[in-house]
Image (spheres, grey):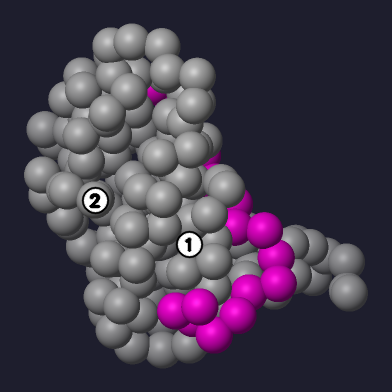
Amino acid sequence: MEARKIVVTRETVYAEGGKAAPRPVTRVVGIAVIANPCAGHFVQDLSPLFDTGVQIAERLMPELVKALGAKPLAYGKAAIVGVNGEIEHAAALLHPKMGKPIRAAIGGGEAIIPSASKVSVAGAAIDLPLGNKDNVWSFDEIDTITLSVADAPRPDEIVVAIALSDGGRPEPRVGKGRVL
């Protein structure tokens, strides 16, 4: 994987709704901006992108785990494909193989890794979904983090992002969901 740029952000939420959070919640996002080898033409076999998804996760996860500085409780992923590409390019990066190195870096994860993808222009925002890494029915960790890169994706690029969180929403009050 050759990236034009890597962006890593970290945020800590200390209050919500005018009230101090019971504990701060930290979320980190790693973003890789890569060339889209399929841009501009239809490609039937997208399997080379499967391995690129692995490479992105292997590149970003050590830095994300370190930046989080705590045990991850939630995770998610997203991609924005530049306008010369198609939505299936995002699916090929995010779904078949990317989960394995994400789970390996955090020591497990039984639940699906929620994802979002779209085709758009440079500077477009995407709401990357977060969910509990072990229980898809744990409502407290169902959340999003909005991200964008001002100059990406260019028409022949893809923005690929992975996020981790050490907690759920700061003041959840909607119930615990289904217990597994």
Image location of residue 23, percent across then percent down:
47, 86
Q: Which residue is drawn at the image coordinates 20% and 19% (left, top)?
A: 155
Estimate how packed mark 1 is, as few (under 14), some (14 to 19) or many (20 or more) residues with alpha carbons within 10 Å.
few
Amino acid found under the numbered disc labelled 2 = Met
Q: Which residue is drawn at the image coordinates 46% and 45% (left, top)?
A: 50
Residue 17's label in the rendered image is 1
Query: Is residue 86 visible in the rendered structure shown here?
Result: yes
Farthest top residue in view:
41
For marks 2 and 1, the one nearer the N-term is: 2
The answer to which image quadrant residue 9 occupies is bottom left
Q: Nearer the viewer, mark 2 or mark 1?
A: 2
User: Which of these two is toward me, 131 or 104?
Assistant: 104
> Residue 136, relative to residue 158: is it above or below?
below
Q: Which residue is drawn at the image coordinates 22% and 41% (left, top)?
A: 34
> Residue 44, relative to residue 177: is it above or below?
above
Q: Say left or right for 171 vs 127.
A: right
> Residue 117, relative to residue 76: is it above or below?
above
The residue pinned by badge 2 equals 1
